[in-house]
Amino acid sequence: MFLDIEKEIQFLEERLKYIKDIFAGKKSKDISLLQGKLEDFKENYRQLKPGLAKQRLASLQELFDFLENKLDHQLSPMDKVRIVRHPQRICLKDILENVYDNYTEIGGQDEYSIDPAMLIARAYITRKVGKKIYHQPVMVIGQEKGHGEEFRNGGSVKPWGNAKALQYMKVAEKENIPIHTYVFTPGAYPIEDYPGAAQQIARNLYEMAGITVPIVAVFSEGGSGGAEAIALADYRLMLSHGYYSVISPEGAAAIEGKIRSGQKASPELIEKCAAFLKITADDNRVMGYIDKVIKEPALGARPYHYDFFKLLRQEVIKATDEIVLKVRGVGLLRSFALRKLNNPNIYVNWTLGKKAQKRLLNLRYNKFRQMSQHAYLDGTSWWQKLTGLCSEAGWVIYGLLRYDFFKRNQQRLAHLVDDLKGEVLAVGLRLQHGWERFKQKLPWSKLTPKPDLCELTSLSKWDDQEDKYVYLSPQAKVDRAVSCPNADKDGCLDQWAPDLFGDMAGVCAYCGHHFPMEHEWYLYNVFDLNSIREFNQNIEATNPLDFPGFSHKLLQAKEKTGHKSACLTFEASIQGIKIVVAVLMAKFRGGTVGAAEGEKFIRAIERANLKYRPFLAYVHGTAGIRIQEGTNGVIQMPRCTLAVRRYLDSGGLYIVVYDTNSYAGPVASFLGCSPYQFAIRSSNIGFAGPGVIQETTGLEIPPNYHKAYNALSRGHIQGIWDRRQMRDNLYHALLTMGGDRLYYQ
């Protein structure tokens, strides 16, 4: 009898400790009351009769339930962060055991065969409809925190873990079964070991954009770009006590408070940043990034909340059914079936046909395309919008006639003519060869002088002319000597600024180090003179979360740069070849990406697709996603990647050129997924800066860790360019890369 009571007391002690952990030492009369009642019962229950002791215990349990519900309404956003981080929080193993009817975990336990932080399982959901039983297969993928087990790395996935996840997403696609992903991560493990954190997340996003089976994502802890690696889904659920954010509250506090290395932000500042970032499930649902919130028990779901697992099972089944019904069958019947989804007697087969798969991809693109429309300002007048729509309609008609009809038939005719020419040439060569053999047998043929042979391997001659740059950097107007950062290693001498930043285009004459140059240098010296035509300049970055002090900082950036966002989009030409360009400008808030930048990028790539033109993303520098916009910023990773995928699937040519420092979300998504990526020499490329890596992993980062040649060695980029050769290199790339859909090829 008393043994059972002692077990219940131990359980209540764990609940009390959990409550104290969640509220992190905050003073509360309710918590004090629980502690006092529990201590009183522990001291006196042995002196009571067994029946009375059980009654007192039941009353104490009811008090715990009542006050937990009361405390649940007092939770702050930071309290919810502590809930998802707590060892008592449900994990993916719990979900597999209680939501799915059978499963087999895939992969070994060694971190180089499959990162233990990424759990993959082939599972079944059994459904009984009437007298018939259905076993529906599904691929389950998610981060596993393992109730605090250290080898799981807290759910922080290394690059090969995300690679393994992608591999089994492709397996699910081949088997035509749905994918259920569970996001339980504080963020990706920020290392660039092959295949590289940024590089692999970009691959995952790109492939998920085109996967032809339903994807349901469930968020518990969605930290930064690491969450996006498995979260590009057709239906996005979120647990009510979870969080989904561009950065951790501690990270935001460190940036806002300008905390130096080794120091910590105050708890008050961390609490404020958690509230300002709007990271909760309800916040993200209101902003449109979550489709539905799943209600958890008071103070968050724990492994013994079996009713919650039943609810979660119902929601993931219903979400999968809804995705399938939206894309399959006759429209009228689909609408009727959707209204009957709450009926348990409705069974939906999750297998999709070819037409349904195509509809699925269109719905997925449109879903993300409509996101974050509230988070930027479009100052385009109604007249300009109307003109743009008319122009777009004209380009659609022109493209159908010029490229889809005439060019296709023209190509067929050209191929036929080429084949005929080849046959005629082959016959002619045979006749010529016979004639030559006949002539050699004639007695006077030996008197005929032999012609000089052409040396085919000789290099062509060219006149080396001095480069003349249209744009002169302001740095060239300062009369001073400049020291190269490689002087100690390579013995570089000091150089006069007018020469270095003038004729030498900011390139050290001794070692080739590239000093930073303004993005204007590229606008005037890479593209044809007077060919730049800017568009969408009225799309403006705003402060959608009303983050304190950020509106003033944005205003300062706009006044200083003369631009309304960090993204500049325009049409231009290079030696007569017309292209569409998006530039991320480092001088505007570090080239960070928010809703305005994402929208401009998408519109630019849609214009390139509409006009059958190549698309160039020149990254003058980017510090990543703009944290003050919260999820409005991080959602640009899947949004822009979907646009890239659609453009490339249509046969476009997408080239990325990195310069200066390019980090974080953009590199781990819509930039990093390009098949043709290049870097200006001396640039840095990676997922996280050296300071962030050292702080989060404790690893010592070498000085050259993010250098372009390291990115080249692991296959992230395909080449390193000298700044002075960028124009010629781009021109040759445009001639040799891409499909024949491009108008000039």
Image: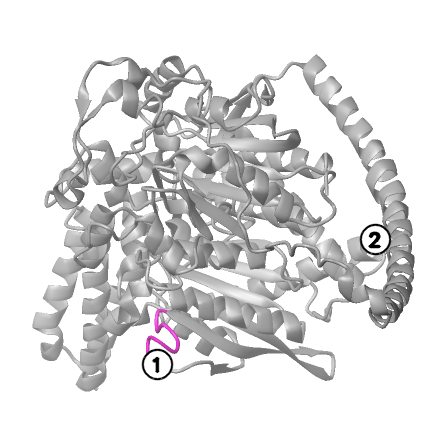
Amino acid type at image mark 1? Gln
For the magenta stretch, what is the residue range? 109-117
Query: Residue 731's spot in the image, x, y percent?
Result: 58, 38
The residue pinned by badge 2 equals: 331
- Quote the CA–CA distance across marks 1 and 2: 46 Å
| Residue 422 image point, x, y percent | 86, 60
Residue 338 in the figure: left or right of residue 149? right
On the picture, is 456 further left or further right than 519?
A: right
Q: Write the residue at 54% across / 51% down.
A: 458
Count residues near mark 1 (Cα–Cα under 10 Å), then give few for <14, some for 14-19, many for 20+.
some
Q: Secondary structure at mark 1?
A: loop
In magenta segment, residue 115: yes
> Which corner quadrant of the image does residue 488 belong to?
top left
On the rendered structure, is 701 left or right of 504? left
Above-or-below relation of 397 to 468? below
Numbered tag placed on residue 526 in the rendering: none
* Residue drawn 66% across the image and 54% down it: 452
Can residue 75 be seen from the camera position used here? Answer: no
For the stretch drawn in magenta, the main secondary structure is loop
The percent position of residue 481, horizontal first and vertical second, equals 17, 22
- Left or right, 416 with respect to 469, comes to right
- Sequence-wise, which precedes: disc 1 or disc 2? 1
Task: Work out whether 545 lies above or below 368.
Answer: above
Place of residue 643 in the rendered image (x, y in percent of width and height, measured from the top left): 61, 44
Q: Is residue 465 visible?
A: yes
Q: Quickly name the residue at label 1.
A: 109
